[in-house]
Image: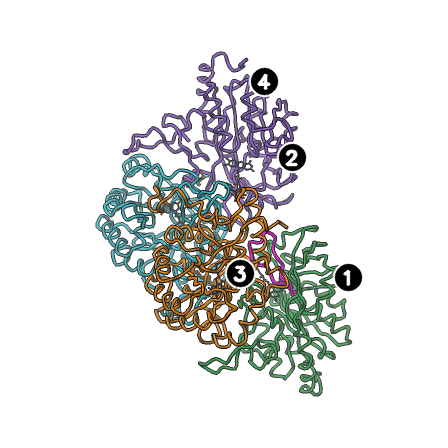
Chain colours: A green, B purple, C orange, D cyan
Amino acid sequence: MRRFSDNPESFFKIWRKSLPVALASPISALVPTRILDRSEVARDVILLGVEAPELVKRVRPGHFAMALLPGGQAAGVALGIYEARGERCSLLFFLAGDRTRRLGALRVGDRLDLVAPLGNGFDCEGAERDVAIVAGGVGIASVLLPAQALLARGARVRLFYGARTAERLVEAERFAAEGCELLLATDDGSRGYNGVVTELLAREDAAEAVFACGPTPMLRAVSAYAQERNIPAQLSLEEAFGCGVGGCWGCVVPIVRTSAQAPSFPPSDADGSDVVHARVCVEGPVFRARELRW
Amino acid sequence: MRRFSDNPESFFKIWRKSLPVALASPISALVPTRILDRSEVARDVILLGVEAPELVKRVRPGHFAMALLPGGQAAGVALGIYEARGERCSLLFFLAGDRTRRLGALRVGDRLDLVAPLGNGFDCEGAERDVAIVAGGVGIASVLLPAQALLARGARVRLFYGARTAERLVEAERFAAEGCELLLATDDGSRGYNGVVTELLAREDAAEAVFACGPTPMLRAVSAYAQERNIPAQLSLEEAFGCGVGGCWGCVVPIVRTSAQAPSFPPSDADGSDVVHARVCVEGPVFRARELRW
Amino acid sequence: MVELSKFDLSARIGSLVLPYPTVALSGCYGSGAEFAPYVDLSRLGAVVLKSVTRRPRMGNSTPRIVHTPAGMLNAIGLQNPGIEWYLQHDVAKFAQTPCATIGSVAGFSVDDYAYVCERLAARSEIAAIELNISCPNVAHEGETFACDPELTARVVRAARATTDKPLIAKLSPNVTDIATIARSAVAAGADALAVVNTVRGMAIDIYQRKPRLGNVTGGLSGAAIRPIALLAVYEVARAVSVPIVGQGGIATASDALEFILAGASAVGVGTANFADPRAPMGILDGIVEYMTQQNVRRLRDLVGTANTGFANINQIEGDEG
Amino acid sequence: MVELSKFDLSARIGSLVLPYPTVALSGCYGSGAEFAPYVDLSRLGAVVLKSVTRRPRMGNSTPRIVHTPAGMLNAIGLQNPGIEWYLQHDVAKFAQTPCATIGSVAGFSVDDYAYVCERLAARSEIAAIELNISCPNVAHEGETFACDPELTARVVRAARATTDKPLIAKLSPNVTDIATIARSAVAAGADALAVVNTVRGMAIDIYQRKPRLGNVTGGLSGAAIRPIALLAVYEVARAVSVPIVGQGGIATASDALEFILAGASAVGVGTANFADPRAPMGILDGIVEYMTQQNVRRLRDLVGTANTGFANINQIEGDEG
Ligand SMILES: Cc1cc2nc3c(=O)[nH]c(=O)nc-3n(C[C@H](O)[C@H](O)[C@H](O)COP(=O)(O)OP(=O)(O)OC[C@H]3O[C@@H](n4cnc5c(N)ncnc54)[C@H](O)[C@@H]3O)c2cc1C
Ligand SMILES: Cc1cc2nc3c(=O)[nH]c(=O)nc-3n(C[C@H](O)[C@H](O)[C@H](O)COP(=O)(O)OP(=O)(O)OC[C@H]3O[C@@H](n4cnc5c(N)ncnc54)[C@H](O)[C@@H]3O)c2cc1C
Ligand SMILES: Cc1cc2nc3c(=O)[nH]c(=O)nc-3n(C[C@H](O)[C@H](O)[C@H](O)COP(=O)(O)O)c2cc1C
Ligand SMILES: Cc1cc2nc3c(=O)[nH]c(=O)nc-3n(C[C@H](O)[C@H](O)[C@H](O)COP(=O)(O)O)c2cc1C
Ligand code: FES
Ligand code: FES
């Protein structure tokens, strides 16, 4: 019993129509903030709340920030904006390498400069009835605001959330409290479905639209799933960033030239290819699954 | 009215005789410690107390430690052992560059590995009656234990202590409380004598012996002062360190070959020079002013 | 903010005089416009544009960037729309930034350089041309032009013939003797030298057991290479007398001053912009603070002053190891 | 502690078989004895001794060390007592460490190398000889032997004639094309290659306006150079088939594994010992953990496995920049 839109094609049109709005570049700025709160929500997972009232007003679901490390010696860290309410934004991140560790060493009261908000964000306007959000690992940080926006529009939101083990399913309860239906998966079976989250996704009823954020292999599986079923899927990609603001072309992904997100680029003499490289940081990070050529 | 020993030559002999003891290499070890307390005694000056009961027993005045930075990516930092009593040793340091800043980022409860105790230390045995301790800037960290040892032996101890400004004269009161006479100097005159500490030293009565630790220009001035007056002077040198344990020969200073501290080395064919390079970390850091050829 | 007007901070690159010695480097600051929301571009000496080639290039596959200790590897692969499209669509926009715009030309043959240089230099928006000869030259089996004094000379000579605008040759650190290359570039007509481009390097993913970069190898930049780049500037400054744009790991005013004292007339900031887009402006402020403190009014009076006293680096006694 | 006996961790350097692939590098671990109070030396593959020369050397004036981002510059200047004194006073002591001892020879002429190599190799305490040809050669105007394929070959050939012990030639990264030098060293008789020595660099004190090192220039080591060293190993591994002792910025097991996958049979740890003398032992443990996880029992089965699939690095498409 499939539950996606009775007419996926028309749904897709509505959704595409809203693209120019979603793609309008946010008015980003260099935002000096102060750390309001810091907690280790699980081992090696940090939640930092920062004071940034002006930023809250400008953030849309799926935006990210470049967190500038104090000392200015290492490149900034791209982080999804997890929460944005009142005076406070928050960042949720894993202690992965040197840069996130430095960020994790900050304490309450310390200053933290952000370049934000950045990226295009998820388009929540057209996808209002029944949405599956698929999050893998740290991808969870980029989907709370979209979930809230969809719920506020009255949509049914199911969160398909996968992680290595139960303790890595951070903030799951938070999503339930917001009104999401939780569908959890762990690689070791310590909580929820024993396997990868995309398997779980395929076992359940399909939604009208899919939003996803997580590691590339997961996104590829989501993409295959959605295209097989002709469900519009918005994927928030992760690539290694240099600048985060469109200046270095370090973060590209191949997309079809006809995409509204394709940067203008002449056809290649050599192969007349219909693919161009779009920057994940500016044209993305959210791309339509069917427009990617990765 | 000069107040040094009536017979400086005989004093010097006693002092030299004790050298083998002072030079005996301490039984150093890799000591895992835990941070007990941390305070910022002045802007950018950190005092870290660590739990290290076994180390306390082995530390002698003038010893230093290599503090191994967590993560193991940057060379250890050579630091004088400031205090050593009961279960606790402490380190006093300035936030100078990247490595001291990393060390300064540690918090109470964190682990800190030390290689310690290292170096030869000051020889306090022969210098018991009237000693001038000259400290410049961070050199203060290496002279508290010598001051305590001398005071315990009933010596008069005057601390000549110089810094850029009053607020950089950290821990001066601590030395007074221990029983030292304070003679302070600041470059800007904000406290004590307005000028460099070696000028102040020259204006006061000479002592029987001088101990000094501080920047090289200060040590050179102390050395000139002491040699003019034929006063034995022990100088704790600072050089950039690699290993801190004698393995890299990065930290040398030229001394006379006849010094008890000279490492064995064949005469140079070329110039028959009577100078050899001794390692500050093993043969030093404390050298006799008259034996240095720098 | 410091009072800049009391100081002469200008830097000369051939006939081009920059008001400030701070240059945002090719490939690291877009056209400048990308960073306009975060900084005051009028406080920048110049922006060097991303290198442009004769034909459009998609660039390398990803990952194009790997972060490394105190630096990063990149292998963008000169993604660019090719000179025709560039002239038609991009150059006019670039000129809107309130600082000088320096074009950067890359190529795979001597002809390529001459062709692109001529077309780009013809545009009034472009104040000077940098020849990026430090990227692999597929026509010569992976060797870059800047690794060979003769190839360097040929590219510079060909480009020189096409324009009177200031020509900057960008040298590679991946050579046995950079001074020889520098002499060759200057003899062939370069007005200035950019010293240096990235150092070749690589990273391996031990779990996937394959290189981390899509392109296998990449260029190392950032603070990690600063001592290497500084020595290159020092050696080049002793070999030639044209202005040098020192670059490689500069992040602070102190870093920049090391390069200036070693012989650079201007300083380039690349990777440090990714840590903080305000880096070039902070460097400018810090240079002025230093000049105040050291009582120096003209920046050029500092250039190469750590250099004096040594006639030739090879005559210095002692050695490494 | 991990169970080492279940794994074959041995590494071959010519006829010498090390029980473990971890080597403490020349100039960075003394004779090993200096570190004995802090570590279990029997868990080390070998120690390479500080380089020794024909005549005694005082070395350079201080400062000899400058700390830099993620690394350090050194210019020790080969301080050593000369081969005679060394044989008489030092070598017997060195042999007391419970791991293999590799001698290191430096020189200023081809003759020097042959002379010192012959004398040192005659001692039973010395398991193998490393030729440090990557330090400046005053006889050739500051150029080091390892910067020229012909000079490299001459030194290796001369040393080869004096001994049957395993000979390791230590290469310099400061060259345009390290593969050519590597081929030359192997053709001349080197049993193995150490890849690489330090990268030339410098630092300037902006307040004193002079170079920070007593010797003006120095060698950059530590994590900062790791991507550079790794690429050198990768390129050398494609050029020759003798064992490589990979080195340059290795501090963790993951770093070491990158070098092994790139083609190194053994890994050297230098600067990381200054951060933690236990680094080589931690690396060994980490390698075993990785082998457990990856289900690999013989370390040599991993060597060069990130290398497969690319016949020649120059054939790889795309480029840096
Ligand atoms: C738009 C966007 C949004 C993001 N949002 C978030 C977020 O909200 N929260 C969050 O935690 N992260 C987020 N990330 C990812 C985050 O930017 C990176 O995790 C961060 O850059 C890690 O940096 P690091 O310096 O700590 O680690 P790095 O040193 O960059 O590497 C991380 C670790 O992974 C290892 N590693 C790197 N590459 C590989 C590889 N190919 N195979 C195996 N191991 C590898 C490294 O050795 C290291 O241990 C986002 C990224 C993007 C592009
Ligand atoms: C035996 C011994 C004992 C010591 N005891 C103590 C102690 O108790 N407390 C303490 O604080 N320190 C002590 N030191 C010094 C301490 O080891 C160094 O301060 C420390 O290494 C600084 O390291 P860093 O990485 O933080 O700074 P580094 O990066 O090494 O440099 C420190 C700062 O000084 C600058 N600098 C370096 N060299 C120069 C120069 N020539 N001219 C101008 N600026 C320069 C750098 O740019 C940087 O800003 C001791 C040293 C020795 C050898
Ligand atoms: C992401 C990135 C892209 C680059 N692209 C170019 C380029 O297109 N052309 C060029 O000449 N140099 C390019 N460079 C080199 C820089 O301009 C600069 O010379 C080098 O990075 C050293 O300086 P830095 O350490 O300050 O980054 C690039 C560097 C980076 C990091
Ligand atoms: C302080 C110091 C002294 C060194 N002395 C020597 C030496 O005498 N002979 C030699 O061949 N290499 C010497 N080296 C180079 C190292 O053996 C090693 O090849 C290089 O440092 C790279 O490895 P690393 O990054 O792990 O240190 C020295 C390195 C350092 C840091
Ligand atoms: S990270 Fe620089 S363009 Fe995207
Ligand atoms: S610091 Fe290594 S020998 Fe002294």
Label 2 packing within 10 angstroms: few (<14), some (14-19), many (20+)? some
Judging by the rendered image, the residue that carries numbered circle 4 is B154
Q: Distance between the residues labelled 2 and 4?
A: 30 Å
Judging by the rendered image, the residue that carries numbered circle 3 is C46
Disc 3, disc 2: CB below 8 Å?
Answer: no
Q: How far apart are marks 4 and 3 (CA)?
A: 68 Å
Q: Distance between the residues labelled 3 and 1?
A: 40 Å
Q: Earlier in the sequence, mark 2 or mark 4?
A: 4
**Residue A147 image position (x, y, % from top left):** 72, 71
Label 1 packing within 10 angstroms: few (<14), some (14-19), many (20+)? few
Between disc 4 and disc 1, the foreground one is 1
Going by the numbered disc 1, the residue's amino acid type is: Gly
Question: Helix or strand or loop: what does disc 3 sit on?
Answer: strand
Q: Is mark 2 within 8 Å of ligand 2?
A: no
Determine the quadrant in which ligand 5 lies. Answer: bottom right
Tell me which chain the residue with mark 1 is part of: A
Give me the residue at 45% from left, 38% from top. B245
Range of residues picked out in magenta: A64-80
**Residue C312 image position (x, y, % from top left):** 35, 46
Respond whether the residues carrying marks 4 and 1 are from the same subunit.
Answer: no
| Label disc, if present, on residue A86 of the rendered structure | 1
Disc 4, disc 3: CB below 8 Å?
Answer: no
